[in-house]
Amino acid sequence: MMIKSVLKWTSSVLAVGLIVCVGIIASMRAGWWNPSFEDVQKKHATAPSKFVMVEDVELHVRDEGQGPVIIMLHSSMTNLRIYDEWADRLKTDYRVIRIDWPPYGLSTDPKPSQGMPSIVKLLEKFVAQEGLDKFTLVGSSSGSTISVLYTASHPEQVRALALSTLPLSSPPTSEPPATVKIVQYINQNWVPNYLPKFYYKSSLGWLYGVSSRLTPETLDWYYETNNIDGKFALVKQYYEANLKAVWSKGAGDEAAQIKVPILLQWGDIDPVLPIDLVPGAVAEFKNTKVEVIHYPDVGHYPMLELPDETGQDLKTFIDKIHAI
């Protein structure tokens, strides 16, 4: 009798648990857990943010300071907020322009993504519309690749390149922690438009060389901007476009065309773009000098992990460019 009661109770608990799980998954698929674009915009597009129409694209832009122009391009899955502390350091002597490039951050493009080449074209239009002349491009990860593609197309406009963790070919396969892999599987197969905050904390902790450097503020904007309803479909479209548009051949030909000075900043324990990629990347720049700075305990985001040290190295490089 006791065994039957226990089995009945266990079955009831399991049934309730299953119903709850199905309900949670259904609510996530329906977008109930996603922050609205309006709410995220209100929270993260505070001063000095502005929105600039470039044809039919609405660009989220921060334009600060006076002097020679620096344009900063973030990495995939991030936005212009990764450069908050670098921008604060640079804007005392330079005009620092940061943009969210779609599909990331708070910029919106109604057209289907064509990958990095479409971002290059968007930057071309933005530069022309703003009347910008020569400038330094700062890029992180895929933002570095976009910077290389742009400079190869517009050598007369770019004064120098300051790049961190640069992929010139399709990034190698990396092995994230088990927690990250499990949640990614659920996202890809059951809940395609939402990832919980603990996933981003685990994922960013893996991408950082020292996970304790991850601040609550960074975690918040990373989680909220990436979980805007509909964002995951746009990101998938962007990635698929890049497989054909860029990674089928890489960006080595464009790198070989560049003649301006280059700073390459790289974390020695980056799990996505390992440090052993550096010699190959440097070798691709056949017609210019590349200054490389390593950071021993840093991962994929030097500007987030060690903003003071890496920011000072960046400013020293840019100051030297403008002293010539």
Image: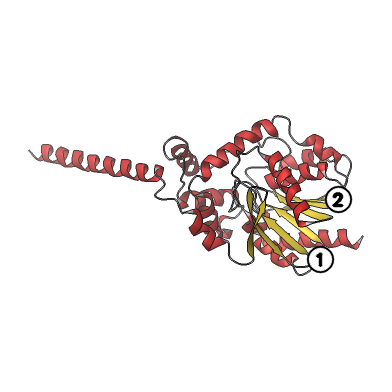
The answer for how far apart the CA atoms under marks 1 and 2 are is: 20 Å
* Residue shown at 74% from the left, 38% from the top: 168
The quarter holding residue 240 reads top right
**Above or below for 218 versus 179:** below
Rendering coords of residue 137 (x, y %): 77, 52
In front of the other: 6 or 95 = 95
Residue 315 visible in the snapshot: yes
Q: Residue furthest right?
A: 324
Q: Please tell me how crowded label 1 is: few (under 14), some (14-19), or many (20+) other residues with Cα within 10 Å.
A: few
Q: Nearer the viewer, mark 1 or mark 2?
A: 1
Q: Which mark is residue 244?
A: none
| 306 in relation to 13, above or below | below
Of residues 280 and 228, the one drawn nearer to the viewer in this rendering: 228
Instruction: Please indicate, yes or no, whether residue 247 appears anywhere in the rendered image.
Output: no
Residue behind mark 2: 261
Q: In percent of the image, x 68 and y 35: which residue is there?
A: 170
Residue 256 % position (x, y): 84, 38
**Residue 78 in the image: x percent, y percent?**
60, 51
**Residue 302, image x, y percentages:** 67, 55
Q: Amino acid at mark 1?
A: Gly
Which SS class for mark 1? Answer: loop
Tags 1 and 2 in contact by the CB under 8 Å rule?
A: no
Q: Secondary structure at mark 2?
A: loop
Q: Which quadrant: the N terminus?
A: top left
Q: Quadrant of the rendered structure where residue 49 is?
A: bottom right
Mark positioned earlier in the residue sequence (1 or 2):
1
The residue under label 1 is 67
Quarter of the rendering occupied by the C terminus: bottom right
Instruction: Relative to 321, say whether 181 is above or below.
Output: above
Few, some or many C-alpha atoms within 10 Å of disc 2 (few <14, some 14-19, many ≥20)? some
